[in-house]
Amino acid sequence: MAVTKYEVRPGSYFDSVVLMQLQRSLVELPDIIDAGVVMATPANKDLLSASGLGVASSAGSDDLLIVVSAANDDVAESALTQVDELLARRRSSVTHEFRPRSLESAVEQLPSSRWVLISVPGRYAADVARTAIDLDRNVFLFSDNVPLDEELKLKNSARDKGLLVMGPDCGTAIINGIGLGFANRVGTGPIGLIGASGTGLQAIVSEIANLGSGITQAFGTGGRDLTGDIGAITTLQGLELLARDGDTKIIVIVSKPPEPKVAIEIMQAARKSGKPVVINFIGYSPPARRLGNLHFAVNLADAGQLAVDLINTLDTFNLGQDRDEAAKHTKDGYLRGLFSGGTLAYEAVTALRTYLSPLYSNVSVSGALPMQELFTSSGHTIIDLGEDDFTQGRLHPMMDNDLRIRRLLQEAKDPDVTIILLDVVLGEGAHINPVSELAPAIIEAVQISSRENRILEVVAIVIGTADDPQEIESQILELQKIGVVVFTDTIEAANYVGQRLTFVQSSKDELTSQEKFSSQFSGINVGLEIFYNSLIEQGAEAIHVDWRPPAGGNEKLMSLLAKMK
Amino acid sequence: MAVTKYEVRPGSYFDSVVLMQLQRSLVELPDIIDAGVVMATPANKDLLSASGLGVASSAGSDDLLIVVSAANDDVAESALTQVDELLARRRSSVTHEFRPRSLESAVEQLPSSRWVLISVPGRYAADVARTAIDLDRNVFLFSDNVPLDEELKLKNSARDKGLLVMGPDCGTAIINGIGLGFANRVGTGPIGLIGASGTGLQAIVSEIANLGSGITQAFGTGGRDLTGDIGAITTLQGLELLARDGDTKIIVIVSKPPEPKVAIEIMQAARKSGKPVVINFIGYSPPARRLGNLHFAVNLADAGQLAVDLINTLDTFNLGQDRDEAAKHTKDGYLRGLFSGGTLAYEAVTALRTYLSPLYSNVSVSGALPMQELFTSSGHTIIDLGEDDFTQGRLHPMMDNDLRIRRLLQEAKDPDVTIILLDVVLGEGAHINPVSELAPAIIEAVQISSRENRILEVVAIVIGTADDPQEIESQILELQKIGVVVFTDTIEAANYVGQRLTFVQSSKDELTSQEKFSSQFSGINVGLEIFYNSLIEQGAEAIHVDWRPPAGGNEKLMSLLAKMK
């Protein structure tokens, strides 16, 4: 009959590698059935129970709980008495070398270091990160359980100094070819990545490597960067760095579900990078496979494949072309979209929100603001005139053009309006010749604006088939004859309009200093020694800080721990 | 100086075509500047104001408001006195013919009719639809403003009789080549469609026609069919009809943003159809471009193109193959996924929710239920072991396999578990040889289950590159040697597991009688005469009911209206 014995060592800091190794050493002792060495959090106590190592101990989250299950009492007791010895045994296998005890002295020892890797427990992590920023170093913050307001303060102060804070809870980054945290080995290539998802970055980087390509940088941001609270500070910094980096030809952004308004902000920033950007916002519905320079992936493998596929089209895809074309033809002023088809209006909004901000609509889509006044537009606005508000006791706008014509003339009188977007839906049930009524109104609208020395452009989406009673070809021809730009696909039309109204220019703000990332990687590690070893194995210049929590704790184990390091 | 005069005709029913025509006739009178003829809802009064036709009238939603703007008082007054005459004038252009006054007599007159098209005002529509169902007819319900509980009652009673209710607020359908409501003309072909979005259906059907292909049926459902309240009654009926229809080789489903749990239900039903199904849930994030027989479109044009592309692969894509293969190798029992990578777990859930229900997870994704007990699994479960609950004071499972091995053995002891899914993430920072620890545990897990005469299958996703320190090839080989099925992409692995656990059989329930849709279209129209004319022009057998609201209203205008019809 197995017996279970346990020991509690209250209140102190323990490196989780040490805990793992102690547990393994205990299990390897003769006649020991199982062992558990954990900080006594409620979850960890449940886990012990699930493994048949449950004990009735009142130990708490700051206490170390050591449990052994053995064939009999003596074996169990004897195992527990060996704990100190087992911890000490590891000591002999560790080479002694001089290690700084503080970040400050580490920086003096390795002045070329530009990065500090932090993997100490969450409650100490923000303080260490703050010191790193004060010392003008970029931060890779692996630690989790850092409060949100601390994250915001750290990221803001880092940005002010042109520094990056990747994390907290940042699992993965690759800087100048050196992997930080969990990172796959990948060669140099034209793809730069930004990830608010550690394994997301790993899966995409692996896909890129396995497809024979490589990367410039892979910036991690931590999982909360794309929340409204943080506002994508690190993601936007990374985007700006990659946009200005001559070696980066293609950018990939991957994130766990982002806050919709933050997603929009990133898409608009990505738009202005002028480079092809592959976006994989997990759980976020992509409006198209491609919208201008934005390419939308549906999953991680797809993102890697899209990025590599884009390399092969780089020769034909003049990087500046999209931007230059758009800039050349760009116009100021507002768009007014007057739709008869609800789903077409919806599609137009999903595409246009990646270009225009703020965008108003009576269609409810994240990224669009509700119209303030239904009968008077302001700013960029997409209106679904088939909504109940407009059709009570009235024919649907596909049948009766009256309402749309009135609104068209009303919009034309607004001096800020430069583009009007209309859908024309043909087929059974619809007006038998909608263009015969819309064309004179369009001409009148253009005249209204030209009398005031404005140029009003009208763009139309015509949906229909060659067999429809309205004769689609002549409907399109009649529109083109009076200067209307005609599309047969809403997304394409929205993409055209978006590009016309989006002025793209290279960012000139030195948000983050490029120079800091151009040199060879050199870093300081604070926390898990595993990560220091990893840096050295990768050939990086690195130094490990013999860090210990500022406040006391269990003196006995602390001194043991100190000997082990 | 223009003057505005108005007249109110209180409380009655007016066909909106009549209102439109009266307004046009008034505008065409000499010296009339503008006119408005609307039911005096608040929105319509705002619209009049926006057109410069605002009047201070207390008329309400049930009242007709006639407004004219003219050069002077006399012209305006004279126009208003001509209203009755203008209404009467149209009479002469309408040919007289015998028309039934009720649906009952229409059915007697056209016993072959299988459909009733209803476009009367919302408050009368449910009653008419109920009568149609009582008369054993399918319903196309164009009317909007039908209460939700009425919709549910109508759809339930229709389904019980093997009938369809498309709508309310159904804009578009094409039945046996005849367009109902707004519909584009398209030839016959192998694609069957279901749409909870009228213009969505129109755009996809047009795309299909313009790409040279055609359709079997296009069922509309009304925009609320995919809400939790209605539970996709019509969509599921349509899916079942198309699944059993020999002429339909490919199915397309389009919908405005569906309620997540309803989306899952439809995807699982689509899965069981055994046919390629193109899904375009607008605003819903697709887990992949393809998952088994499900193909995910990102927008309307994409949906049409995907469907037509699939035709070209039909020869090589044996329709029964996927289903037969899956059925042949299908196994009962539950899946347990034990993940170290959070985003990989997330991707697995997004894919597996289209196969398995209920699916539990500690990853928050719509379509997955939260785990009831974190330390004991039940049913199909995907666990992210990298979540905070599992990593407090403990190394991440990518570094330390202990927790995962314990859980693996725990799951193996559960007699209902037949598949275990693991990720193995390689690279810097990760365990230097994870398979050396996982393999013995996997062997032990398989032995545990085989001792109880069960066959436990283990599936692994290995993420990494050829240059990673763990040597990915040997990691994969070692896993394969002990019988693990290995993938390098989460979606592919989830797809495999999903197919293994999904038993597909042809539906045998006669939810909706196929026979009712196989004959030539024959229908009865109640409401807008436009739709009757459209049916006749399309060569359909049809009859128009001279419908009037059951309760009185304005007697004078009612009698005029009657003469016009």
Image (tube, coloured by chain):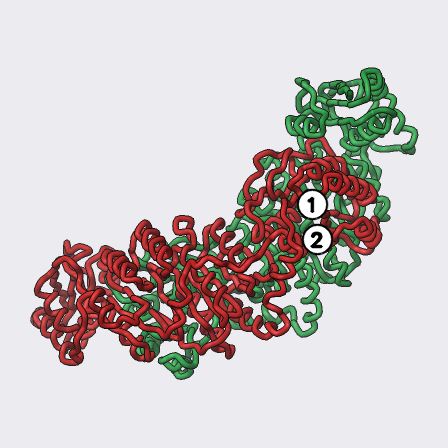
Chain colours: A green, B red
Foreground residue among B214 and A7: B214
| Amino acid under disc 1 | Ile
| Amino acid under disc 2 | Ala
Question: Considering the numbered disc 1 on the image, is that residue within a helix, a strand or a loop?
Answer: strand
Residue at 31% x, 64% y: name it: B137
**Percent position of residue B171, x then y:** 35, 65
Q: Residue A203 carries which label?
A: 2
**Percent position of residue A370, x then y:** 39, 53
Foreground residue among A421 and A242: A421
Please tell me whether residue B394 is drawn above or below residue B218 in the rendered image: above
Q: Which of marks 1 and 2 is in front?
A: 1
Asked which quadrant contains residue A534, the reply is top right
Question: Considering the numbered disc 2 on the image, is that residue within a helix, a strand or a loop?
Answer: helix
Residue at 24% x, 63% y: name it: B120
Foreground residue among B542 and B86: B542
- Lateral position of residue A130 relative to residue B435, left or right: left
Please tell me whether residue B199 is drawn above or below residue B230 in the rendered image: below
Would residue A453 be seen by someone viewing this image from the given angle? no
Mark 1: few/some/many CA within 10 Å (<14, 14-19, 20+):
many
Q: Which mark is residue B420?
A: 1
What is the tally of numbered marks visible in this picture?
2
Would residue A379 be seen by someone viewing this image from the given angle? yes
Asked which quadrant contains residue A463, the reply is bottom left
